[in-house]
Image (cartoon, grey):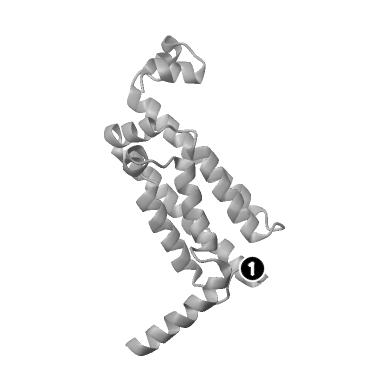
Amino acid sequence: MTSDEIASGAGVSKRTLYKYYPEKDRLIESVMESVREDLGALFAQELAKKEIDPMDRFRAIVLGITAYGSRFSKIFMSDLQKVRPDEVQKMIAFRTERLRSLGSLLREGQKAGVVRKGLDANLSVEILLAAMNGVMTPEFLAGGKYSFATAADGIFELFFRGVLEPGAVRVQKQRYRKVNNRAN
């Protein structure tokens, strides 16, 4: 991304941009800091809405992340990885911390009877986090055929619904138990 594109996107002249950000590194740091602040506020706002169903809050966070992340082009994410891998690592650490906070929503969902009782909420979040950290990377998104929104939607669809049709779940559980009993 060029300075002209940044200035144009911000609605300012290139000269004004350089007045506030004489170095591109400081501009990148400022943008990424703003991203973390905005997403942190989204998480805090939705987690605090105790009167709303926990899974509705979970979905609101997911939709917010997807909408926000979709604003960044594949080129920007790829360039960020090349030029400022430290900022990418900060985002991964931020994402890790924030996604782990969603375990509380899963536990609330269990108490409310909308999330399976036997589900390990912490392990579930770690699985979600592994998927996010494996797919929602600049390398994957820039080199692949999936947009940020498509990849995020795919991850969350699998997380919430799984891969099996509802009627097939029972059949697959029975088969799994038979195979598992033979193995033991």
Residue extending furthest toward the right: 51
Image point (36%, 19%), residue name: 2
Tell which of 14 and 133 is nearer to you: 133
Residue extending furthest toward the left: 82
Q: Quadrant of residue 72?
A: top left
Q: Is residue 60 left or right of residue 39?
A: right
Q: Amino acid at mark 1?
A: Val
Dividing the image into 4 quarters, which one contains the N terminus?
top left
Asked whether residue 43 is in view, the answer is: no
Q: Is residue 19 above or below residue 43?
A: above
Q: Quadrant of residue 129?
A: bottom left
- Where is residue 154 drawn, in percent x and y? 48, 52
Q: Is residue 10 above or below residue 135?
A: above
Dividing the image into 4 quarters, which one contains the C terminus?
bottom left
Residue that badge 1 annotates: 114
Image point (47%, 48%), residue name: 152
